[in-house]
Each structure stands twice: as C-alpha cells, then as structure tokens.
Amino acid sequence: MKGYVGKILKVDLTTEKWHIKSFDEKHVRNVLGGQGFCVDIVYHGVPEGADPLGSQNVLAIAGGAFDGFPVGTGGKVAFAAKGPATNTLVESIMGGSIGPELRHAGYDALEITGKADGPAYIFIEDDKIEINDASDLWGKDTRVVPEALKKRHGWDVKVACIGVAGEKLSNMACIDCDDRQSGRGGLGAVMGSKNLKAIVVRGTRDLVPHDPKKLLELALHYQKIYEASPSFVEDTKYGTGEFLGWVNKDRGVFPTKNWQESVYNERQQIDPYYWAPKYVTKNKACFACTKPCGKLFEVKSGKFAGVAIDGIEYETLYSLGGTCGNPDVESVARANELCDLLGLDTISCGVTIGFAMELYQRGIISRQEAGVDLSWSNAPSAVPEMVELIGNRRGFGDVLANGVKVAAQKIGKGAERYAIHTKGLEPPAYDVRGMKGHGLAYMTSTRGACHLRAGFYAPELVGKFWKWEGIDRFSAVGKGPMVATMENFMCVYDSVGLCKFSRGFYLIAKLPEVLEAITGLRFTEDELLKIGERIHNMKGAFNYREGVTRKDWLLPQRVLEDPITDGVSKGSKISVDEMNLMLDDYMNARGWTKDGKPTPEKLKELGIE
Amino acid sequence: MLVPYPENCTGCRFCEMACTIFHEGVVNHTTARLQVHKKNVKVDFPSVCTHCVSCGEDCCVLHCPVEAIKKENGRVFVNQDECTACGTCVEVCPFGVMRMEEKAFNCDLCGGDPTCVKFCPMKAIVYEEPKPEQYEKVKKLLGEE
C-alpha cells in the first residue's frame, strides 16, 4: 500500500507519553483517510458521556488520502473531537499545511488525549516528539504564536494553534494554521481545555506514490480543466463571495439581520464585485490549491487602516456583514481579522452578534447590559467591538461566548425565539426557508447547522447536480434520500482531502483513478460511497449514544413559523409537517430509527463495531 | 531562467511537490529544487535557483572547494563525479535551493520545460529571461526571516 505512511501517532498530554500505532489496507478500505481517520479515532477513543472540555476527550488530526501529493485542491486536513457546542462528534476541515507535514514526519494521523499540567505545545520532528512549555505563548494571538515558534524552530515548521478564545474555552473557538481555520464546532476550545496552545511539525521524509508518472499526468490534466473553467476566473478574481449578489437577488435566501430578512438591500459594499478591485492585493491559497479562492484583503487608510486578512469568505460576508446588518466592508474585514487573531469561528461569532442585535432591537437586552450600542445603524462599530468582547470573554461578550443557544438560556426573557441554530451550532449563509432540502441538511448534519456536510445548497440553488435534475428548492418531497446520499458523497471528499469546491470537477467517478495512482489500491464509485456512508453512520451512532436524538435536530422556531418576508422567495417557510416528512424520509433512507438511531443491523452491514 | 514573482505567490506549494515528483517520483520539500516560504498573511514567496544571476559573492560556483560546480550556457550544475558532498554550496546558497542527498544538486530547469511553472497559474514562477530585480526581492524577503 503506497501513499500512506501506515502510522498513527498517539500523544497523551497527561502522562507525557506517546506511542505509534500501525494500520494496514483494511483500515484504508474502511475509512480512507482525513475525516474518516479522525471520525474513527474519536468514535473509538472518546468514552460515553465524556466532557468535551475534559481530559477524556480526544483530538484527532489527519490529512486526507491525497494530502501531500500533487493533486490540485487536494491538500485538506481534518480535525475532530467531541464538540463542546453540540455534544456531538465534530469534524472540521481546513487547508493548512500541517496535514502533509505530519505525513512527511511519518504519521497519517495524530491522536491527542489527556490534559497538560500547564500551557504546552507539541513539537514533532520526524521521530523526535516533545511536549514543551508554552507559558510564554499563552494569551498570544494566532499570528504572534506561529511567528514565535518559527523563530524558535526554524522558518519551515508548520504550526497549528489556538487564540485567546480557545484558551478561554469558547464554544466558537477555532484552530488556525497558515491563516486558514478549522472553524466550526469549537475544536479550539478542545485544544484549550487540554492546555495545548499549538502543534508544531517538521517532516523530512519522502511521500511515495504508487505511480508518480500517472499522478503527474493527472495533475496536469486537471490543471488544464481548472484553468479553462469559469469558476477559475470567478474564484481568482472574487473568491467564494462571487455569487453573493445572485443569492440575494435571484434566489432571495441571504439571511439578513438575524434572519428577519432574506435579501440584504444594503449589500453593495460587501459584494466582492465592489470590494475585490479596491482592496485585494494578492491571491491566497490553501495547501496544494492551484485554483485559489483566498484573497489578501488589505485596508490602507481610514479607521481600519492596517487590516490584512485572508478573506473575506462568502460565509463571513453574511455572518459579520448581512446577518449583523453591517454594510461596511472595512468593518467586516476588521471583525474578520479580530476573529482570526482571537481564534473565533466567523460564522458562529457573527450569527451570535446578529442575535444579540435583534434582542437589542426588541428591548430584551438594554444598552447597559450589552455595554455596546447594538442598534443596527451602529453595526460598523458594534460588530468589531463585540468580536473583541466575545474573544476575550469581557463584559457582555462572556454571555455570548458560547453561542446563541447558551446565550439565550442565560438571557431568558423569550430570547430563545430569536436563537437561530440546530443542535447548538449557528447556521451558515443560506436561508433554508427557501431551500427546504438544505434545511433538512442543517438538521441532519452531525455537527449542527452546516452547509458542507451535505453541500445541498448547490443542488437546490442551481436546480441540478450530479445525477439529479429539475430539483425544486421549495419542495420537501424526496429530499431525504438525496441529502443522505450527498452526506456520504461529502464524507468521501473530506477523507481524500479534496476541496469541496472541486466536487463538480471530479464527482465521485473520477476519484478512483487518482486514488489508484497514489495508493495502488482500486476502488469503485460504490465502494467509495459505502465508505462515506460508514463514516456518517459512525458519527450518527456516536451522537445518538451521547443522547443527541431527533428532538435536538429540529429547525429553529423562526424557520418553522415566520415566512420569508421579501425577495423572490417571499412567503416560503418550512412547516412542521414538511420538517417531519423530510426527517422521516431521511431516517428511512439511512436505515435509522425515526429517533435518529443507526440500527444494529445497519451498523453490522457497514462493519462498524 | 526561473523568475520569481513574490507578489503573485499564493503559498500553495504545488511547485515544490511537482518538482520532486518529476525528478524523483516522490514528494519531499527538503529536496525540491525550489522553496516556497509562507512568511505571514501578507507574504508568500518562491525562492528559486537563479543560476548565479543574483548570487554575488555567495555564488556556489565560487565557493566550491573542488570546483565541481560549473556554469554552462548560463546554467549551473554540479559535476556528480567531482562533488565530495562537503556541503559548502548548500551553506552559501543565498536562495536555499542547493540541495544535498549523496551529492549536491540543484535546479536543472527540467531539461528546458520546468514542471513547477506548469502548475503556477498565478505566474509566481515564470520561465523567461532573468530579471535581477525579482531575485533581489526574494533575497530581501529571505534576509528578513
């Protein structure tokens, strides 16, 4: 078996001991790599009822099967643990270079257990493994930390770290590597709870593919396809926010002012067609991406002069822009930078601020309680201010630091009505009232409201994808099996480590050829989808065991009760009946009980123990 | 020659992988004949072999104690029979791209059709006439590290 190292490094921070576990082809055929490896580690490693922020939780890191090899956009690394925001198995994927570096060091995956006595960082250099003191790094931001560690260990080490939000155990804390983030579900807090500030890796070993010539040929073939595609031009010019205007005007599903509206009329400045020519000074990319959607966004003058970020992503244009009613792109950029520095997920952080702003609008919280003028008209000042308060858990920021679900419980006074989340995770930038299957995907996502576990926004917004055509986004009929299939599909992408934005270039049918060139192993399309199904079922079984059942999956009240008020999707909502129909269909398609439990027969069929 | 354009580099490092897959059939950035530095959010840059265009006094050709490094048609190469693997060239190379396994080696421009260039749609590495001012930019960035 080529391509893989065949080794998993297990480090226990409590005992400061580590050992190496080998795996063989059987493991690869089971869970493939990346997300699959991570899910397997957490599924088997975290005891029932373990506190996500306790020493029993396990943090797993693994590059995908393609990671480290020349496959365009194939450099994704997965992080996973039991997540503090949802109490479920959370995996979060990013494009930082720590995944391939770990493989060069000799490990396909890293499994971290226990809790260090005090601030610590793990240093890995091939066979050398150290757990070092990080007292001097504690309290430092996600740019200072890698800079300091590179000064200490050399410019070429790769660093994943947390910011202050992770140290302070915020449910929305992320993990940063190369200015890219594993954002969702609070994995930064899991690192923080282990007193683990950073992971530093240098690897010098060869990664050996099965057929290098074929691999290079395939890479050139796909490079030509990328460069000839319209999305290449869109991605490199405008980034992921390219379709923001279209989602607003032509689809009417851009959640605005905490989902009170679905078209953001003041969007002119946050549309990349406005800001890209003005503020973007360079393209940025994930590891191995030759079709870069990252942008270096720089503010050169004015109140926010000096801001420099890799962004602004579509999701962030919504979370720190639209849903906070913040039309000022420089303010959005500054808030984005603060999120990055403090180590906060921009989606959860922005949605939580938008939630607080609606509570303020309704008089549920006062100016005095908030400590900041949270009126919509003050958004350009209030949003960056609130990000700082949340990240540092200062003042009202402490109330908001664990997201909308926890904040609503703390605030009371009917605040729950305005808390938009599923399973405790704040939703991304699609108003699912006008895309019902995507609404189902927000419920079924194992890590809480997510646009990427099923990626169902693409089929519904475009109306066709893969083997489907004529998809009606306003219909709840038939969505269950489609969402289940797409979840399996996406698990495969996260396990080979291919960017989901490339899913249209490869679909599933073209992955076996690339996998064979790297590993020498043959897979069929069906086998890959079965692996995806297995990975998703492991997550489902884990979540059910942790007591997260159908009642916790349900859509927020606003989505079920308040129809969309404006734009082309006006009048649409997901009724309780439609929600239940979709959930029943989904459970059926999965072979799960109505309550969301993967049955013993299903688990047996998939070989899950 | 390979000309680096730091202002275009996204930091994806595909060029490093392509380099060693082409030459050795494996991936290893420690033997790639070029390096990508991800310095901070603002700065990523490729460092390439300039074939003595901008090396000045630090030129490997001048420093090789056994004169195993030669320059021919504007290109620098290491005579594998004469190289003693002493490591002097690796130490002096201002661009960090003289590499060492059993013997020293460096960029051979893939025989005239550089693989790294094919995978750089952003044109951060371009195969063209040498541009000393671009090499100086990289040298300055390396000096800051």
Image (tube, coloured by chain):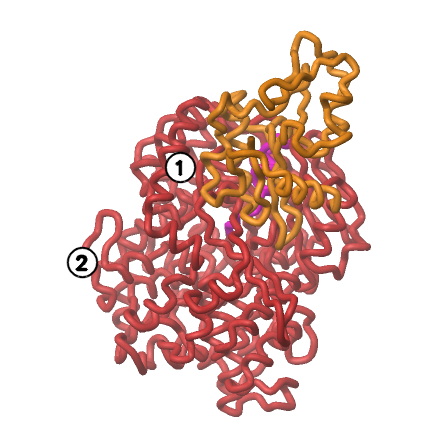
Taking the image as shown, residue A428 lies to the left or right of residue A139, namely: left
Badge count: 2
Q: Residue at the location (32% across, 57% down)?
A: A458
Mark 1 vs mark 2: tell me if same chain: yes
Q: Amino acid at mark 1?
A: Gly
Of residues A159 and A539, the one nearer the viewer is A159
Q: CA distance from mark 1 to mark 2?
A: 36 Å
Taking the image as shown, residue B139 lies to the left or right of residue A333, namely: right
Q: Amino acid at mark 2?
A: Gly
- Label 2 neighbourhood size at 10 Å, few (<14), some (14-19), many (20+)? few
Residue A516 percent coordinates (x, y): 39, 27
Of residues A459 and A233, the one nearer the viewer is A233
**Which chain corresponds to the colour orange?**
B
Q: Which residues are magenta?
A: A92-110
Q: Colour of chain A?
A: red
Q: Residue at the location (70% across, 75% down)?
A: A394
Residue A543 percent coordinates (x, y): 47, 55
**Quadrant of res B129:** top right
Taking the image as shown, residue B133 lies to the left or right of residue A231, namely: right
Foreground disc of the pair 1, 2: 2
- Assign a secondary structure to mark 1: loop
Confirm whether residue A491 shows in the render: yes
**Residue at numbered disc 1:** A607
Q: Please, which chain is the residue tagged with disc 1 on?
A: A
Q: Is residue A2 above or below residue A224?
A: above
**Quadrant of res A417:** bottom left
**Residue at numbered disc 2:** A470
Q: Is residue A236 above or below residue A210?
A: below
- Assign a secondary structure to mark 2: loop
Q: Residue at the location (55% across, 58% down)?
A: A281
Q: Is residue A421 above or below residue B11?
A: below
